[in-house]
Image (cartoon, coloured by chain):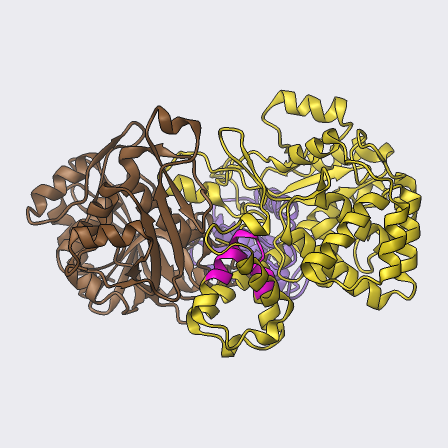
């Protein structure tokens, strides 16, 4: 997408003919908003695209809502197939809204995969899955790994093919908040960012452009091999402990997006995943420590 | 019944002709043909597929479309990207079919003790009776009919087995109990599934209230289950009465396809169906909605209704509008509060055995929203198992 | 007793996960409960046998302790619908 100028992209977005490729999914995007165009131009510079494709997997739009408020407080809403599933957000959050909206659309409708709320990254042909509740530092850790030799599959949606038990990639921008933003800026001064906004509920929010390598290889699937539950604990030394398998099963069964939808298959997939992966809990405070430990895990030396 | 209630109070009805700004009624007709004639699907261009799938998702019909394609054996001949979407929809509808079976078993276990006839209605009825109308369908809540005298017992039994009244709003609660003489919908505390217990197929405030006794007496048992369903004629009439609001096609295509499926199956299966249907509509005083339903089904879906039947039904129908209060009652049932998906039972460490998850009839959109960090409230889909 | 073919079971050192194919529910059991459940699944329904199954998990416990633990466990399993009481 780097060969498109911002003006060209804006034109395509305005008439709804722009379609973005992330992993195997093609999303047709329509918007009049200039900030959304700018954000896309920066964050998806490496991604393939199409113009007015015959077929797209998703048709999304970010626009001003059609309600009374448009005259008072400026807002943005996200639509899929013309339906707005969410209440509108403040206008300046439009670029982030597009990202969240796409996440939701994928998690809600792509049942060809077993979808987990977790980050996933690949190294030496194998995938590590990082499930974690909000606030556990998963995104910061995921970003650091992606910037230091691990191929990013996704920061939010881990997609597992139930038949092959492989993980698929989306290679989309990484969502970061508050202190994590500063941490990563310091960690990698050359990193490229989307616009930063402030949200009363979440604080500072922005997205980081994914490394070009993860985008170029986004169609490569790989086998999950490790499941690591990270926990950021200020001032702590790194601690990696094996995690009980039934405990891990419980987490996935309770937190996967479509565990129930897949019925028995959901049970089988989680069971197999827990069987085929080494499961750990990981506490840390310094990113460099974490990178070292993950290097060690990926080298196959861990028990 | 599926419509969106926006935060500002506008109600958006889903009619075929207003679904797509750009392509208008042509796309609607393409979708109808795609569902009615799956043998013609191979050879559909990718371009046409693009708009058919979008419309199908909006109209809550992608499941039916996928099921038709699968049943007709044409999936292999369709483009890969299209297959992925259809197969994904089938995963969802297959699960739902399974989930409704699980849920009705749970309900049967809870209500066996009250010794009353338990008559499933609408989607759950189609599923348990294995009717074609259930194929590829998404189910939201379970609708159950019991004799009026048993309502309180049913509520008590359900509460003992983990259901609780779903209304957060005490005004709604009172509205239901006092004015509608209905039980408010009840949600199961662990599974989040919702059951609506009725004593008639229309609220007490309806202009023409059919006799509940007649309905109960004509109901048929479903072998191998604890449940009964309405007689074929009554099922069709029930479907017809829920299709219309002030004489207009309200929820549209999805419900109409249900009706079409019922009419096709019953007219073939039952020897004197049309005659019984006409008579019954007259007896129950519901000839007008049936007249509208038959008219629209013929016009939009090409359902084959013998001309003499249409004529006699329309003659028997007392013209008039279905009352606003009746339909308000139905809409109120349609507005469900969000159900928190995180289990709210305490995980006592000392417990040796832990319940984790049940099935869901509704998509766990609350969970998605929480995890994706948005506390913004999901717009209310009556049937949040919408296939996106 | 336990219906044949009704449950899918995955077992690990720290417990097991159970899928109920009739009701669509998923449950997790700790190691002691798993042992008892699996014993029942194999048909070993005798009380003394079940107590014997439990004893390795509670080495310090008396027979009486074990018996009451077993009762508590069976009650939990029954509430979840995983086992039904025999009528003999």
Which chain is depicted purple?
C
Side of B123 where A119 appears, left or right:
left
Which chain is depicted brown?
A
Side of A104 where B203 appears, left or right:
right
Q: Identify which residue is drawn at 76% across, 32% down.
A: B323
Placement of A144 over or under A113, stated as above or below: above
User: Magenta residues, as a range?
Assistant: B51-65
Placement of A293 over or under B152, stated as above or below: below
| Quadrant for the C terminus of chain A in the image | bottom left
The residue nearer to you, when weighing A203 against B192, is A203
Q: Identify which residue is drawn at 58% across, 60% down.
A: B63
- Residue A301 at least partly seen: no
Which x, y percent locates residue B114?
A: 83, 39
The residue nearer to you, when weighing B266 against A236, is B266
The residue nearer to you, when weighing A240 against B114, is B114
| Quadrant for the N terminus of chain A in the image | bottom left
Q: Identify which residue is drawn at 87% across, 51% down.
A: B313
Which x, y percent locates residue C28?
A: 51, 51
Which x, y percent locates residue B118?
A: 81, 46
Side of B250 where B346 appears, left or right:
left
Q: Quadrant of residue B41?
A: bottom right
Side of B253 where A174 appears, left or right:
left
Q: Quadrant of residue C79?
A: top right
Which x, y percent locates residue B304?
A: 78, 64
Which chain is depicted yellow?
B
**Residue B56 within the magenta-colored segment of the rendering:** yes
């Amino acid at each position: 997408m780097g060969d498109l100028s911002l003006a060209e992209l804006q034109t395509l977005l305005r008439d709804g003919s722009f379609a973005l490729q992330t992993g195997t999914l093609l999303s047709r995007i329509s918007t009049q908003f200039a900030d959304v165009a700018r954000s896309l131009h920066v964050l998806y510079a490496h991604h393939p695209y199409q113009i007015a494709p015959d077929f797209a997997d998703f048709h999304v739009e970010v626009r001003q809502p059609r309600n009374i408020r448009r005259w008072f407080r400026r807002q943005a809403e996200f639509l899929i197939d013309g339906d707005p599933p969410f209440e509108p957000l403040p206008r300046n959050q439009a670029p982030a809204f597009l990202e969240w909206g796409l996440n939701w659309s994928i998690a809600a409708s792509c049942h060809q995969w077993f979808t987990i709320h977790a980050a996933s990254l690949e190294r030496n042909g194998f995938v590590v899955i990082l499930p974690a509740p909000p606030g556990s530092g998963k995104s910061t850790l995921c970003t650091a790994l992606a910037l230091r030799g691990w191929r990013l599959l996704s920061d939010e949606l881990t997609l597992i093919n139930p038949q092959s038990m492989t993980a698929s990639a989306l290679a989309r921008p990484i969502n970061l908040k508050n202190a994590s933003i500063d941490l990563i800026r310091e960690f990698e001064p050359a990193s490229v960012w989307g616009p930063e906004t402030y949200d009363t509920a979440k604080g500072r929010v922005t997205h980081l452009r994914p490394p070009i390598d993860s985008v170029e290889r986004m169609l490569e699937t790989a086998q999950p091999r490790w499941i690591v539950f990270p926990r950021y604990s200020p001032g702590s030394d790194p601690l990696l402990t094996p995690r009980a398998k039934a405990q891990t099963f419980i987490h996935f069964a309770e937190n996967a997006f479509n565990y129930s939808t897949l019925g028995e298959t959901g049970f089988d997939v989680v069971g197999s995943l827990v069987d085929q992966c080494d499961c750990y809990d990981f506490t840390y405070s310094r990113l460099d420590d974490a990178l070292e430990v993950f290097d060690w895990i990926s080298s196959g030396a861990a028990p | 019944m599926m419509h969106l209630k926006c935060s500002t109070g506008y109600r958006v009805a889903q009619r075929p002709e207003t679904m797509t700004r750009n392509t208008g009624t042509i796309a609607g007709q393409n979708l109808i043909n795609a569902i009615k004639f799956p043998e013609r699907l191979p050879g559909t261009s990718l371009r046409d597929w693009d708009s058919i799938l979008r419309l199908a998702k909006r109209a809550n019909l992608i499941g039916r479309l996928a099921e038709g394609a699968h049943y007709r054996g044409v999936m292999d001949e369709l483009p890969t990207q299209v297959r992925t979407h259809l197969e994904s929809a089938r995963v969802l509808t297959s699960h739902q079919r399974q989930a409704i079976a699980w849920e009705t078993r749970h309900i049967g276990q809870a209500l066996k003790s009250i010794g009353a006839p338990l008559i499933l209605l609408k989607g759950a009825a189609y599923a348990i009776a294995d009717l074609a109308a259930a194929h590829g369908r998404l189910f939201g809540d379970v609708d159950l009919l019991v004799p009026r005298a048993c309502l309180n017992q049913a509520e008590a039994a359900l509460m003992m087995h983990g259901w609780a009244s779903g209304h957060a709003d005490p005004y709604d609660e009172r509205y239901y109990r006092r004015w509608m003489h209905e039980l408010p919908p009840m949600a199961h505390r662990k599974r989040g599934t919702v059951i609506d217990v009725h004593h008639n197929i229309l609220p007490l405030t309806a202009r023409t209230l059919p006799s509940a006794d007649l309905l109960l007496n004509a109901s048929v048992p479903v072998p191998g289950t604890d449940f009964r369903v309405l007689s074929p004629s009554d099922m069709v009439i029930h479907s017809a009465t829920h299709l219309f609001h002030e004489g207009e096609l309200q929820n549209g295509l999805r419900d109409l396809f249900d009706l079409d499926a019922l009419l096709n199956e019953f007219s073939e299966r039952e020897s004197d169906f049309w005659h019984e249907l006409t008579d019954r509509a007259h007896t129950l005083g519901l000839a007008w909605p049936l007249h509208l339903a038959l008219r629209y089904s013929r016009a939009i879906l090409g359902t084959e209704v013998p001309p003499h039947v249409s004529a006699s039904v329309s003659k028997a129908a007392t013209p008039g509008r279905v009352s606003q209060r009746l339909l308000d009652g139905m809409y109120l049932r349609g507005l469900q509060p969000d159900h928190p998906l995180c289990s709210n039972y305490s995980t006592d460490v000392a417990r040796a055995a832990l319940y984790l998850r049940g099935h869901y009839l509704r998509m766990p959109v609350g969970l998605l929203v929480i995890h994706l960090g948005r506390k913004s409230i999901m717009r209310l889909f009556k049937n949040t198992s919408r296939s996106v | 007793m336990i219906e044949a073919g009704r449950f899918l079971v995955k077992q690990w050192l720290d417990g097991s996960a159970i899928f109920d194919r009739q009701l669509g529910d998923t449950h997790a059991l700790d190691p002691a409960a798993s042992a008892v459940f699996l014993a029942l699944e194999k048909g070993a329904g005798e009380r003394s046998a079940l107590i014997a199954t439990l004893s390795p998990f509670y080495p310090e416990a008396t027979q009486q302790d074990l018996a009451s633990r077993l009762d508590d466990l069976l009650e939990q399993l029954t509430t979840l619908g995983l086992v039904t009481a025999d009528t003999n």
